[in-house]
């Protein structure tokens, strides 16, 4: 019986389904065979490469080359979880910040409240400084007379200030801090003399404590930072012998880091006995109240062996003309002349104040998001 069209379509469909089934069965096998060959080739290359590293490293473990199958559950590697390490880092940073804050409080100068210009006086900072200067000048004068300490500088270092009121708030703040340090230095000198005098009286001796403040000179503050001394790779002995001032003649180079300390130096010239000066040195650092850094110290006297050949280091020297200079060259044999530079410190954020506290902070220009169109004159609008 011949097949009709329906039978033909049924047979064709069965043949097509059979072809698809055969292809679905054969193709994965072909793909798997190809992958096995590729894996074996990669394993061979890996083993050959591993042989080259046997001199420095051990042989590759079996699981790496696929020779062994790991059936055990994989355990976490020994160590600390990242979350615990992160929390430990946060705690460590907090402790470090707390320690830095304590060190700053102990090392910074405890400036009194009157060194901060009140809000109501910011329109006239020069007037506010003048009032404070006159008050502190009187306080210092009373303390000097009460304790019999002589001070040759009645302006306590501010003779350059002519009383002008037109100064900026930044300048007034600088003057106020310098005034506070100058007053503190004078009070320390007075305290050292009084303490030495009481000690001598307590031992039943005739008081010989003496203190005379020849000069007080507050200097402009400076922003400083840490320094690192590194060996100079281009150092040359020949260059050092030829030109000691050249860069290649220096064995070490000084690298300056970002400044974060504001120093307020005060230069003081004293005439006193050695015991009183020793008490003064012990008193310059009182953490939490005042902390003065000694930047420079010179001690001379006609009665010190090293000073007997040359008197030029004394104030005025042998060619002294003024009464003050002549008096400086006639020291008592129990006295010394001391030139000391002490500085009070404060700390600042180098990001907010890159140039220090004595310079204005950088003002960031804020660009408006929306720019309003300018008004066009009526005549020009009509012409357009």
Image (cartoon, grey):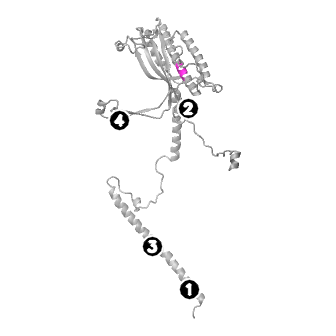
Q: Which mark is residue 232?
A: 4
How busy is the neighbourhood of tag 4: few (under 14 within 10 Å), some, or many (20 plus)? some
Instruction: Between label 3 and label 2, give the one nearer the viewer.
Output: 2
Q: Which mark is residue 360?
A: 2
User: Looking at this view, is 122 or 295 the one in front?
Assistant: 122
Q: Mark 1 or mark 4, which has the lower sequence index?
A: 1
Residue 185, position in %: x, y? 51, 18
Which segment did they paint magenta? 177-182
Query: How far apart are the alpha carbons under marks 3 and 4?
Result: 69 Å
Q: Which mark is residue 11?
A: 1
Q: Mark 3 or mark 4, which has the lower sequence index?
A: 3
How busy is the neighbourhood of tag 3: few (under 14 within 10 Å), some, or many (20 plus)? few
Q: Mark 4 or mark 2, which has the lower sequence index?
A: 4
Query: How far apart are the alpha carbons under marks 2 and 1?
Result: 96 Å
Instruction: Between label 1 and label 4, give the one nearer the viewer.
Output: 4
Q: Mark 3 or mark 1, which has the lower sequence index?
A: 1
Residue 11, position in %: x, y? 56, 85
Say what secondary structure mark 2 lies in: loop
Query: How far apart are the alpha carbons under marks 3 and 1?
Result: 28 Å
User: Looking at this view, is 232 or 3 the one in front?
Assistant: 232
* Labels 3 and 1 touching (C-beta < 8 A): no
User: Looking at this view, is 52 or 193 the one in front?
Assistant: 193
User: Looking at this view, is 256 or 34 the one in front?
Assistant: 256
How busy is the neighbourhood of tag 2: few (under 14 within 10 Å), some, or many (20 plus)? few
Q: Dividing the picture into quarters, in which one does residue 174 lie? A: top right
Say what secondary structure mark 1 lies in: helix
Residue 254 colored in magenta in the image? no
Q: Which mark is residue 30?
A: 3
Query: How far apart are the alpha carbons under marks 3 and 2?
Result: 78 Å
Query: Would you place residue 233 above or below residue 222 in this image?
Result: below
Q: Mark 2 or mark 1, which has the lower sequence index?
A: 1
């Amino acid at each position: 019986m011949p097949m009709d069209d329906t039978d033909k379509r049924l047979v064709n469909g069965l043949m097509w389904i059979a072809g698809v089934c055969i292809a679905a069965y054969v193709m994965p096998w072909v793909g798997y065979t190809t992958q096995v060959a590729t894996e074996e080739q990669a394993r061979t290359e890996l083993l050959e490469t591993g042989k080259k590293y046997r001199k420095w490293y051990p042989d590759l473990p079996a699981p790496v080359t696929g020779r062994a199958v790991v059936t055990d559950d994989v355990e976490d590697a020994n160590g600390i979880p990242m979350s615990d390490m992160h929390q430990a880092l946060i705690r460590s940073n907090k402790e470090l910040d707390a320690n830095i804050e304590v060190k700053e409080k102990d090392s910074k100068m405890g400036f009194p409240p009157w060194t901060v210009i009140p809000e109501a006086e910011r329109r006239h900072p020069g007037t506010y400084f003048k009032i404070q200067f006159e008050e502190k000048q009187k306080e210092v004068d009373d303390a000097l007379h009460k304790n019999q300490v002589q001070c040759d500088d009645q302006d306590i270092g501010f003779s350059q200030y002519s009383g002008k009121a037109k100064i900026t708030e930044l300048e007034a703040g600088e003057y106020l801090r310098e005034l506070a340090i100058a007053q503190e230095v004078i009070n320390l000198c007075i305290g050292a003399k009084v303490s030495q005098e009481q000690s001598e009286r307590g031992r039943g001796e005739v008081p010989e404590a003496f203190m005379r403040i020849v000069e007080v000179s507050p200097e402009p503050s400076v922003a400083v930072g840490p320094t690192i001394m590194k060996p100079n790779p281009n150092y040359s002995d020949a260059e050092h012998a030829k030109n000691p001032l050249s860069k290649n003649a220096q064995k070490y180079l000084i690298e300056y880091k970002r400044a974060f300390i504001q120093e307020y130096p005060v230069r003081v010239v004293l005439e006193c006995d050695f015991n009183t000066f020793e008490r003064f040195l012990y008193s310059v650092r009182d953490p939490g109240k005042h902390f003065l850094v000694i930047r420079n110290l010179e001690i001379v006297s006609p009665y010190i062996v090293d000073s007997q050949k040359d008197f030029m280091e004394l104030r005025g020297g042998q060619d002294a003309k003024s009464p003050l200079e002549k008096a400086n060259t006639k020291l008592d044999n129990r006295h010394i002349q001391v030139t000391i530079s002490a500085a009070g410190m404060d700390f600042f954020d180098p990001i907010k104040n890159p140039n220090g506290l004595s310079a204005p902070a950088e003002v960031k220009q804020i660009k408006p998001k929306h720019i309003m169109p300018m008004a066009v004159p009526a005549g020009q609008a009509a012409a357009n």
